[in-house]
Amino acid sequence: MSTNSPNRPKNTKNTQSARSTAKSADGAAKTGSGGSATGSGSDARGGQRPAAVRLSRRRLLGTASAAGAAGLALGGAGGAWAHSAAQEEPPTALSTLGSTTVPFHGTHQAGIATPAQAHGHLLAFDLAADSGRKQAAALLRRWSDAARRMMAGEPPRDGERDTGIALDAGPSSLTVTFGFGRTFFTRTGLEDRLPTQLAPLPDFSADALDKKRSDGDLWVQIGADDALVAFHALRALQREAAGTARVRWQMTGFNRSPGATDRPRTVRNLMGQVDGTNNPDPDDKQDAEKIFVPASGEPSWMAGGSYVVQRRIRMLLDEWDERSLHEQEKVIGRRKSDGAPLSGGHEHTDPDLDKLGRDGQPLIAGNAHIRVTAPQSNGGATMLRRPFSFHDGFRDDGAPDAGLLFLAWQADPLRGFVPVQRKLDRGDALSRFLRHEASGLFAVPGGPLKGEYVGQRLLEG
Ligand SMILES: C=CC1=C(C)c2cc3[nH]c(cc4nc(cc5[nH]c(cc1n2)c(C)c5CCC(=O)O)C(CCC(=O)O)=C4C)c(C)c3C=C
Ligand SMILES: [Fe+2]
């Protein structure tokens, strides 16, 4: 199994510092608001500081807020002073966090192989009763245009008043990813283009799914390293949809912020586990074939695309947090402190599922999560996991309504998520601490070429 993923630090490219040089969907590294990488010495794989970023005049002028923020940090009573100081100080360059862009165009849509951002919104839209193929195509064209512009740090529409939510911020690694649910094809008369891979997911015995928060005609994933940038994109896309499609459900998620750890590290989930270690590497040819539909794949409009399974998985955190460290580690099969497999080594050592302890028992238990989910336990089934954590307040019993917005990307869900979830459903040690509450499966087409909108090959091909 190769090692890079949107949320693992090996080679550092998929971690916090790695975000300073975002990796494009077509493999090109880009920094800076204009999308042009400048300077050298920035190879995020080497864990060095990123290259200097060439900033546009517009971007530089937009950074007075950095000085303002510094002023505010000097003392709450100094608000007025800080404000005027901010206006007088020459603006400084945005930090790499704000200035980093991810390209909109490419073989794959952005937001799949892109390092997972700190803030995310996932939402589904249903087409209005009087919206068909023509209206859907126009919407995808508007959405693509707005996404492309916002990902470059521009307002969503040229010459129109914007909400202003992201006015002072750079693009902050914003990505917007679009997908189609099964019902989209009936609503638009495109049944003959429905991929077989969009067959409904089987029922799993442990499911307690809320239909109102599941499925949908259109799916959108927004990710950014700044919360206002992410919300700005959400609001802009909702406004573009007015009259054509309505939000069916929306979920907000988060990951660790860039720069929060001393060095690049794989992200943790709300159970405290290092999560994302053993992901396939989208840059590895063999792994990529399991994540993306090949250029010659069927249906042809899905070339370069991927299928995403989304599950809202609530964690029973009160029960979990009562377990001893030893028990918790046994449940996963990895050490909690650093994610190393219990068979030994460090985080990126391949787990040895056959290794026995002094008591003659496997060091990685028979029902440990990493044993049950490993490709070798599931006929090679592979998926790229790129989740967001969520916390939606507290339930009536006082328990946190929190967990994982699990997102699994694969070229074919029947050879990725489905067999693994079937096995988990029969019971791994982790399942008793989880509740699957919402579900969706969406076809996410390949990335748009210059001048194209996302889904054009489906809607106009
Ligand atoms: C159907 C697929 C999976 C679901 C659902 C799932 C839920 C889930 N997982 C964790 C925490 C961890 N998972 C880890 C590894 C891991 N999980 C899956 C699949 C599903 N997980 C796979 C394929 C793997 C990799 C297995 C391997 O090859 O080793 C780990 C270990 C670290 C890692 O490799 O990422 C953790 C931790 C939670 C909390 C969760 C639901 C909320
Ligand atoms: Fe898992």
Image (tube, rainbow, N blue to C red):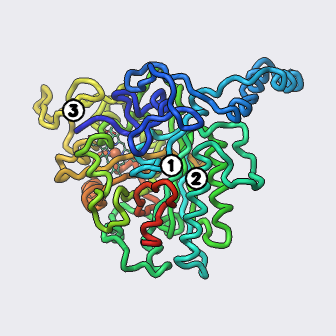
- Horizontally, residue 442 falls left or right of residue 127, namely left
- Of residues 16 and 329, the one nearer the viewer is 16
Tell me the distance, in whole angstroms, between the alpha carbons under discs 1 and 3. Answer: 35 Å
Residue type, mark 3 in image: Asp
In the displayed structure, 27 sits above or below 377; it is above
In terms of secondary structure, where does tag 3 sit? loop
Query: Residue placed at 36% from the left, 50% from the top?
Result: 432
| Residue located 61% across and 49% down the image | 149
Dot 3, crowdedness within 10 Å: few (<14), some or many (≥20)? some
How far apart are labels 1 and 2 at the CA level? Answer: 8 Å
Quadrant in which residue 75 is drawn? top right
Q: Nearer the N terminus, badge 2 or badge 3?
A: 2
Q: Give the residue at mark 1.
A: 104
Q: Position of residue 9 (x, y in %)?
A: 38, 29
Relative image position of residue 143 (x, y in whole percent): 58, 60
Query: Spatial distance from mark 2 to mark 3, Cα to Cα?
Result: 39 Å
Q: Earlier in the sequence, mark 1 or mark 3?
A: 1
Residue tagged 2: 147
Question: Can residue 321 be seen?
Answer: no
Q: Decide: marks 1, 3 in contact (CB < 8 A)? A: no
Ligand 1, by image quadrant, is top left
**Crowd class of label 2 (few under 14; some 14 to 19; many from 20; radius 10 Å):** many
Q: Are marks 2 and 3 in contact (CB under 8 Å)?
A: no
Residue at 29% across / 66% down in the picture? 298
Indicate whether 346 appears above or below 446.
above
> What amino acid type is highlighted by mark number 1?
Phe
